[in-house]
Image (cartoon, grey):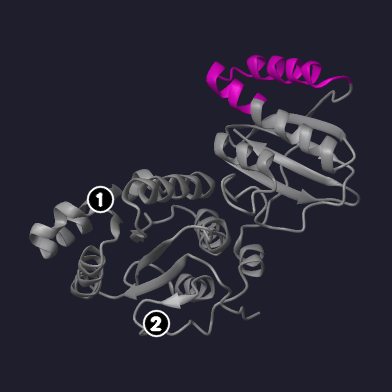
Amino acid sequence: MASSHSETQLRHEAFVYDGDDEFVAGIAPHLRQGLEEGEATIAVLTRINWAAMREALGSDAGEVMHVDCDAQYLRPARTLAAYDALIRQTVAERGTSVRVVAEMPPSQTPAEGAEWLAYEAILNRALAHLPASVVCLYDSRVVSGSVVDAVWRTHPWGFSDAGAPNARYEDPEHAAAVLAPAARAVPVLEPIGIAGDIFSFRERLATAMIAWGIPQTSVMNMLVAATEIVDNARQHGGGATGARAGIVDGRFVCEISDRGRGLADPMAGYYPPASDRSLGTGLWVARQLLFRVDVLPGVPGTTVRLWL
């Protein structure tokens, strides 16, 4: 499903390279051009690649903000929020557009890799309101051919294509839905009563977490996230119909179900509240606080699975 390149302030490019020399030869002039044009420039790189880039830039390196990619790329929702905040703050302080070059640490599992590929599709919508260019770096010596294929499906432009749109780019909603890892079934969870007011539910959920030995800070994160989802169910899903909780793969999990029609947008909850597409603020809050949030369609209704 090809996508048209709609109007957006964001320019999202992919640079697939096959050696250190090609990486430096492509990115150093790109950053230097940004400095010459008065843009704020940010390099989200590993320490090794930043050392090579710093050497290539020479005295100009001091004008480029370096962000350690291992600290930036923790979870997709947190990374989108971090980029949104960083770029908005930089624009406010400098009054210029922002030029970013970024690489991600290698994924440890296929599911994790799928999440980050879906993130690349989501970024096109979540950060569309920002005056920035982002060049995503992929070393073909490290990533597989299937990853490279997904990269071209999720980036509207190729870095080395002289500004021509990428013909293989797909509609972000479609790409995100296809690339995101499918939620798997989990063992039976214990029911937690959903009847009564939200305070009673929170108390029952907190009691269950304490019984499972969950630390206090994590208990509060889950309570806030679960409250947002229950409130979403009340507003949009006809009210919550059930909740279950338990330990899965060493993590505390809480599922909340409703009788609504579900969420048609696979990107729901990824748009930062400051954007003009910030519906699903409750999901956004939950995604910031938790390890993962799965939205599972049902017949009827929807189940939101919260992973602590």
Which quarter of the rendering shows the N terminus? Answer: bottom right
Q: Are marks 2 and 1 in contact (CB under 8 Å)?
A: no
Work out whether residue 283 or residue 187 is closer to the camera in this orientation and state it: 283
Name the spot of residue 270 as percent of width and height, x first: 60, 50
Mark 1: which secondary structure? strand
Which quarter of the rendering shows the C terminus? Answer: top right
For disc 1, the neighbor class at 10 Å (few under 14, some 14 to 19, many from 20) is few
In this view, 237 is above or below 143? above
The verdict on residue 162 being magenta is no
At label 1, the amino acid type is: Met
Q: Which label number is shown at residue 65?
A: 1
Name the spot of residue 80 as percent of width and height, x first: 49, 50
Whether residue 141 sits left or right of residue 222 in the image: it is: left
Distance Cα–Cα, label 2 vs label 1: 25 Å
Which quadrant of the structure image shows residue 54? Answer: bottom left
Residue denoted by label 2? 163
Which quadrant of the structure image shows residue 256? Answer: top right
Name the spot of residue 24 as percent of width and height, x first: 20, 69
**Magenta region:** 196-223
